[in-house]
Image (spheres, rainbow, N blue to C red):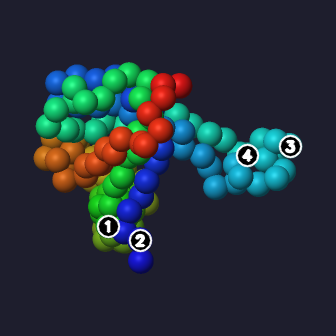
Amino acid sequence: MDDKITHIGIVDSVSEHKVIVRILQASACSGCHAAGLCHSSENKEKLIDVYVDSASAYTKGQKVIIEGSTHRGLKAVILAYVIPLVAIVVTLALAIPRIGEPSAAILSLIVVAAYYAILYTQRSHLAKRFTFKIIKQQNNESI
């Protein structure tokens, strides 16, 4: 089983210990032969921060490969989507019989907002755990 997520990208900018890489994230249907006729297919450009010991080895416009772990990607999905969904459902299930639907809905939104606020305060710690590795591509011409 392949435990890696890879994207080909282009170095957008370089600082002392950080390389910002621009990748093109395609939707699942963008490869379909009818994608040109369908308005649901889309491509989005994403900027990925890659922390390195020495960024001087990279130049703007250089083609690179960024690599991440699928295991860490799954953890990120759980933190960003699964836990908040569970918090909403549990809060609603416990609060509706006690305080009614409108108040329970507001309370569940407050609980999720508090959860995301906690994640926000921990962003530097999380950034260290959810990292990408950068690999120079063999064909290094600038685009």
Q: Is residue 141 left or right of residue 116?
A: right
Viewer-nearest residue: 126 or 65: 65
**Label 1, label 3: how many angstroms apart (C-alpha)?**
36 Å
Give the x, y percent position of residue 31: 71, 52
What amino acid is at disc 4? Ser
Residue 71 in sight: yes
Residue 40, labelled with which disc?
Answer: 4
Give the residue drawn at x 38%, y 46%: 66
From the viewer's perspective, is the residue at label 3 or at label 2 nearer?
A: 2
42 over 90 or under it: above or below: above
Q: Is residue 99 left or right of residue 142?
A: left
Give the residue drawn at x 32%, y 67%: 71
From the viewer's perspective, is the residue at label 4 or at label 3 nearer?
A: 3
SS type, badge 2: loop
SS type, badge 4: loop
Q: Which residue is mark 2?
A: 2
